[in-house]
Image: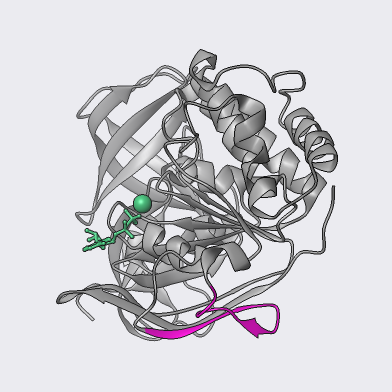
Amino acid sequence: MRNAALPISIRQLSKSYGRVRVLDDVALDIRSGEFLTLLGPSGSGKTTLLMMLAGFVRPDQGIIRFGDADIVRLPPHKRDVGMVFQNYALFPHMDVGANVAFPLRLRNVPRDEAESRVERALELVRLGGFARRRVDQLSGGQRQRVALARAVVFEPRILLMDEPLSALDKQLREHMQIELRQLHERLGMTTVYVTHDQREALTMSDRIAVIDGGRIQQIDAPRSIYERPANRFVAEFIGESTFVPVIAQAGSCAIGPARLRLPDGTPDGAMLMMVRPERLRPLAGPPAADEYTLEGNVAETVYQGDSMLLRVALSGGAIVAVRLGGGARMPHPGDAIRLALRAGDFHLLPSDAA
Ligand code: ADP
Ligand code: MG
């Protein structure tokens, strides 16, 4: 059960409802066999974009290619696309086998062949032997597996999933994330996965396309998105971050008494220095040769079980978040603190004021 995957190419895709521009000049290339996640807040246009790939929403303008073919005018059933929705969308009056067989019936697959393909698809999602069960006897996780089996049973070359795990509790969701990823590795189809959950996106994806307000903000591998966000929106939406306003001058900037060297080619002027809380380390002794020392006072402490979060007011005025391991000693509000920062631990963004 492995089929040639297809690349997807999207250009100048736009859609408005009334005066609201829901998708604004979207361009996106999804590689053949890639697991790409569309990540963005509620209302950012994720479902609209996925529905356009599936053929349920017609764009106002733009091009969508599967391989070499422009498919914008093709109806959904001619697009060779499997789809999994958030709410399962199973037929409650049919048993599991009939639900999974449905796309094969639409395609007039002979009954014997359909039966063996249904059983194979069910085995793939670890529901072998479940064909005669009723849908309403299944748990949420099992229902979502049935929906997945139905989406892949006709061996589509593209698989679309819209927040398929959001109805499941945390433990099952994390388990299913790994299962979906493994299924993708076995089947190899081009997959577009929608979620608003940044950790899910980081866990599952080959690449992430971050979308906000109907515009793609950044497309990159999870690690690049996390470590080198393109703008403040991406930096804040993914992971925790704090921003220190700095003035770059002749390749360096001051934070309190510390003077930090900036990457070659940094232009003079106001910038935002982004620092992830886990990259700041409280210093007991002197800093290492490659570390800068930032001075400040603890403003707030939060105990979170596996870790602790501090807010530190730096001399110079900025407030930064610092994450400590769960075993670390908890400082007190008001304590003086010194923090170590390496050159590779910060990332510069254009200043908001610019
Ligand atoms: P997401 O899936 O990221 O939450 P959607 O694509 O569902 O976002 O919606 C994006 C925006 O488009 C929202 O403001 C939503 O209210 C609006 N929208 C979506 N579908 C319709 C529709 N059929 N009619 C009017 N507005 C819509
Ligand atoms: Mg949605």
Q: Examine the structure image and report whether residue 28 is included in the region drawn in magenta.
A: no
Q: Residue at x 84, y 52 (%)?
A: 2
The image quarter containing residue 147 is: top right
- How many marks the image carries: the answer is 0
Q: Is residue 233 visible?
A: yes
Q: Most extreme residue toward the left, as rendered?
A: 19
* 220 to the left or right of 122: left
Given residues 337 and 267, the one toward you in this image is 267
| Residue appearing at x 78%, y 28% in the figure | 123
Residue 132: where, in percent of width, then height? 67, 18
**In the image, residue 230 above or below residue 310:** below
Residue 177, compared with residue 303, is above or below; it is: below
Which one is nearer the viewer's eye here, 249 or 10?
Answer: 10
Q: Quadrant of the C terminus?
A: bottom left
At x 47%, y 32%, the residue is 284
Assign ligand 1 to one image quadrant: bottom left
Q: Which residue appears at 79% of the width and 40% of the height?
A: 111
User: Residue 114's spot in the image, x, y percent?
Assistant: 78, 41
- Find the magenta span and give its range: 61-74
Most foreground residue, 243 or 47: 47
Q: Position of residue 58 (x, y in %)?
A: 39, 74
Q: Position of residue 217 (x, y in %)?
A: 41, 70
Q: Quadrant of residue 182?
A: top right
Q: Could you tell me if residue 177 is visible in this image?
A: no
Rendered image coloring scheme:
one colour
